[in-house]
Image: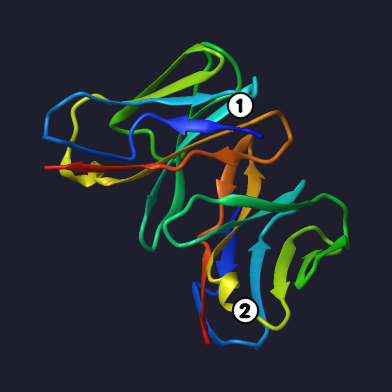
Amino acid sequence: GQQVMQIPQYQHVQEGEDFTTYCNSSTTLSNIQWYKQRPGGHPVFLIQLVKSGEVKKQKRLTFQFGEAKKNSSLHITATQTTDVGTYFCLYNQGGKLIFGQGTELSVKP
Amino acid sequence: DVKVTQSSRYLVKRTGEKVFLECVQDMDHENMFWYRQDPGLGLRLIYFSYDVKMKEKGDIPEGYSVSREKKERFSLILESASTNQTSMYLCASSSPHNPQHFGDGTRLSIL
């Protein structure tokens, strides 16, 4: 069956450093969504990627969908303390919407 | 703005009790979902529904059931609560192929 791994599980960075989380699938994905969950909060939608090789930007955040639609990444440039939280990918698996394991980002001021 | 409301923010129940968690959305969304979130395990799908009176099992349905009698309401039922069901429960709704909107969650403790 389809296997999607999200890595890393945790990332600790100094404020101003960059951060990247990856979702890697063993099979082709129809689309992928990214969510952010702040500590004590609920997941909030960030972006949806549909097309092969798609790249979307939101200020300091860059989202990519691989050419083969098996991999996706979320990159944050020059992290700030407001970026703290857990980032999840969400993908479709046989009609079920499944979240990746999440990457917890902590930022040291 | 989409509003997904979960009936309780915190809930404490006893082992063996029947527990109801309610979720209501105000955006006429077809799809509704129940997840549980545990440290190190992320969000795991319990049940989902794509229409009234329709339900599908997610990845961890054992020990749970759901009810969707009206489009706006999706209830999660713990038939006989056990301590391993202590968790954060999150409800979400969406229209087809669109992002999910989450409620604030219910932190459930089973003693």
How many labels were placed on the picture? 2
Q: Which mark is residue B31?
A: 1
Badge 2 crowding class, 10 Å Cα cut-off, few under 14, some 14 to 19, many 20 or more, is some
Q: Residue at x 38, y 33 (%)?
A: B61
Which of the chains bears the disc numbered 1? B
Determine whether B64 is above or below B39 in the image: above
Q: Is residue B77 left or right of residue A81?
A: left
Q: Residue at x 66, y 34 (%)?
A: B1
Badge 1 crowding class, 10 Å Cα cut-off, few under 14, some 14 to 19, many 20 or more, is many
Determine whether B68 is above or below B79 in the image: above
Three-letter code, disc 2: Gln
Q: Which mark is residue A80?
A: 2
Tell me whether circle 1 and circle 2 mark residues in contact (CB < 8 Å): no
Asked where in the image residue A24 lies, by quadrant, the reply is bottom right
Which of the chains bears the disc numbered 2? A
**Front of the two marks 1 and 2:** 2
Instruction: Report how far apart the C-alphas of labels 1 and 2 lie in the structure.
Output: 35 Å
Front residue (pair B57, B12): B12
Find residue A5 and report its horizontal and vertical position in percent: 57, 64
Front residue (pair A91, A84): A84
Three-letter code, disc 1: Asn
Front residue (pair B9, A73): B9
Q: Residue at x 56, y 14 (%)?
A: B71
Q: Which mark is residue A13?
A: none
Q: Secondary structure at mark 2?
A: loop
Asked where in the image residue A35 lies, by quadrant, the reply is bottom right
Q: Residue at x 74, y 60 (%)?
A: A70
Q: Secondary structure at mark 1?
A: strand
